[in-house]
Image (tube, helix red, strand yellow):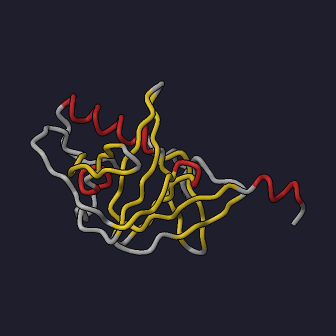
Amino acid sequence: MSATAELQLRSFVLLPLNDRKVALPAESVIELVAQGRLQKFPHQTPWISGVIIRRGRVVPVCNVNQLFGDVDSTQGRFYLVAEWKTGKVRDWCAVPVVQECELANAESYSPVDANGEKRAAHVVGTLRTGDEEIEVLDMGKLIAEFQRRIATGETEPAP
């Protein structure tokens, strides 16, 4: 592989969620950390299970059942801390992880699925690894979509 081809490779962290995987661009992942003490408090933000303290910051822990429509796994072995952006807002969130994450490289990824259909707004593309098609997520768009659904009274998690 030439130096030019290597520069075009993008890295992704594959995050297992029960029986499927999703991918996050590696540049959005801050760190993987051992599960610390989850602080819970009264609030009305359904996508947040609680918070952890990392690097002097209060980091919300995502309720994956709400955001991804999967079984709630707040008791993960560790947390994947990722940065998300919406407009000028930049923040961190933590996702409980039960299984091992993987690192994958791809020269490109498709903004459509295998059938040629456009994905949800928070899915910026799909990666193919072997026989699997893995959605590449934009956490900022996913959180914004969930907040929009709450505001309009929709109760279903993002597809």
Along the horizontal axis of the image, is 76 left or right of 7? left
The residue located at (46%, 35%) in the rendering is 85
Query: In the figure, is residue 91 to the left or right of 59?
Result: right
- Looking at the rendering, which quadrant does residue 113 occupy? bottom right
Where's residue 146, x and y in %? 30, 39
Q: Position of residue 141 (x, y in %)?
A: 43, 38
Q: Is residue 51 left or right of residue 44?
A: right
Find the residue positioned furthest to the left. 42
| Numbered label tally | 0
- Residue situated in front as seen by the camera: 116 or 150: 150
Vertical placement of 74 versus 152: above or below?
Answer: below
* Residue 123 picture location, percent across and down: 48, 47
Work out which residue is located at the far right of the displayed protein and give it: 2
User: What residue is rendered at 21% in x and 35% in y?
Assistant: 150
Residue that appears at 64% across and 58% down = 11
Q: Quadrant of the N terminus?
A: bottom right
Image-quadrant location for residue 126: bottom right
Residue appearing at x 61%, y 66% in the figure: 104
Q: Nearer the viewer, residue 99 or 109?
A: 99
In the displayed image of the protein, which residue is found farthest to the top?
88
* Residue 55 image offset from top left, x and y in percent: 41, 49
